[in-house]
Amino acid sequence: MALLNRVMPSFPRATGLLLVLTFAGVSVRAEDWPEFRGPGGQGISRGTDLPLQWSATENVLWRQPVPGLGWSSPVTAGGRIFLTTGVAVGDGAPSLRALALELATGRILWDTEVFPPAETGRASMHKKNSPASPTPVVHEGRVYVHFGHFGTACLDLEGKVLWRNNRLRYEPEHGNGGSPIIVGDRLVFSADARTDPALVALDRRTGEVAWRSARDLEVRQKFSFATPLLIEVAGRPQIVCPASGAVIAHDPADGRELWRVRYGGGYSLIPRPVFAHGLIFIGTGYNRADLLAIRVDGSMGDLTDSHIAWRTTKGAPLTPSTVAVGDELYAVSDMGVATCFNARTGEVYWQEKLEPGYSASPLAAAGRVYFQSEGGVATVVAAGRTFRQLARNELGERTLASLAVAENTVLLRSEKALYRIGGNRASAR
């Protein structure tokens, strides 16, 4: 804790405590899901009684239509749900909006336009992307929304815009994707654009740029979409964020590079890193997906030749992140091949074909792993070294957003609506 405060004097002691609790695998408020992939950003819920089975009509507590199009995942705090969307108006330029819903009923409490069509304009994007794909962050009574090159903003819990920054214009490829994270007094996100890619930190109180760390990598394709992850190694905080060609760890105070591991021509990276057993697990992107496990031990510099514990192309995801449960690492490829690895060695315990087409990252809770397909099918399996399917749940709507958890219920965003799933909590025996 003393080192954290010395290295990053702008961090309050409460933030340091939050880091310690997160790294210990404990969320401060188990009922909140404050960022992409939940508390700690690892896709793990402490819920013990999540629903096992559902459909479009079975075990649905409520379904709330959501205007426009967005693939940001829902986040929650204090009995409210927050998400973003883009509503096309006029000539098709999106109105970029933030919404709050009541957790108990799904009722929309407010719908605030953050960036109007006059400030966005029409933009091309990948067919699997949307105008609002980055997931918001809710922290200390503020909601931070990010729309990539369109801009970033901070709102209070009643929907009032406190600041906006749309001056960081850059040329994206296929639209926006990576979500922001809170690191002390900074809001950090990747801006790995077609040209001049960088990791950017804004002052979360004002929206002004605190630092910008350029990616000095010689790669043919520079664009990527990864979400950073804050970790602590040997008492030192690090922001780990994959980019085209390498994964890089940064000093949160000033963005300075601490270490890197190169992986050649990997680009268009999407999976968020996962940290377990002293290893960082990352995907390397197109054209060939690799899954890497990298030792993180406090060493600095270029660690390519010394710190890759294992790597594989077998079952490696291009889009979904992985999830670590105990000694196992679970992954699902974009084509729908689910794999259980030994997290430390990369040994494959099982590999099974699920539904075709995956973008959402898996969720782990109460001895189960939830895989949500693009076609709206959720496959639930028992966590363990033997494949055991517990449920197959068909929703009948396109789903690319990752699942969230609120008070032992599942929040599922489809192309048209947000669902709250509860009931039927049969155990995984």
Image (spheres, grey):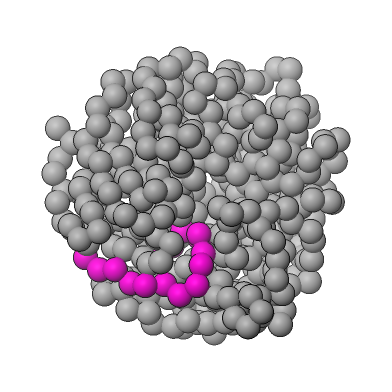
Q: Is residue 415 above or below residue 370?
A: below
Q: Quadrant of the C terminus?
A: top left
Residue 40, position as x, y percentages in the image = 47, 48
Name the residue: 61% across, 26% down: 290
Q: Give the range drawn in magenta.
A: 61-76
Residue 49 covered by magenta stretch: no
Q: Quadrant of residue 261?
A: top right
Name the residue: 78% across, 43% down: 222
Q: In this view, does 281 lie above or below 181?
A: above
Residue 236, position as x, y percentages in the image = 64, 40
Q: Is residue 367 something one can see in this rendering?
A: yes
Total marks placed: 0
* 148 left or right of 277 in image: right
Residue 72 covered by magenta stretch: yes
Front one among 9 and 164: 164
Front one among 51 and 40: 51
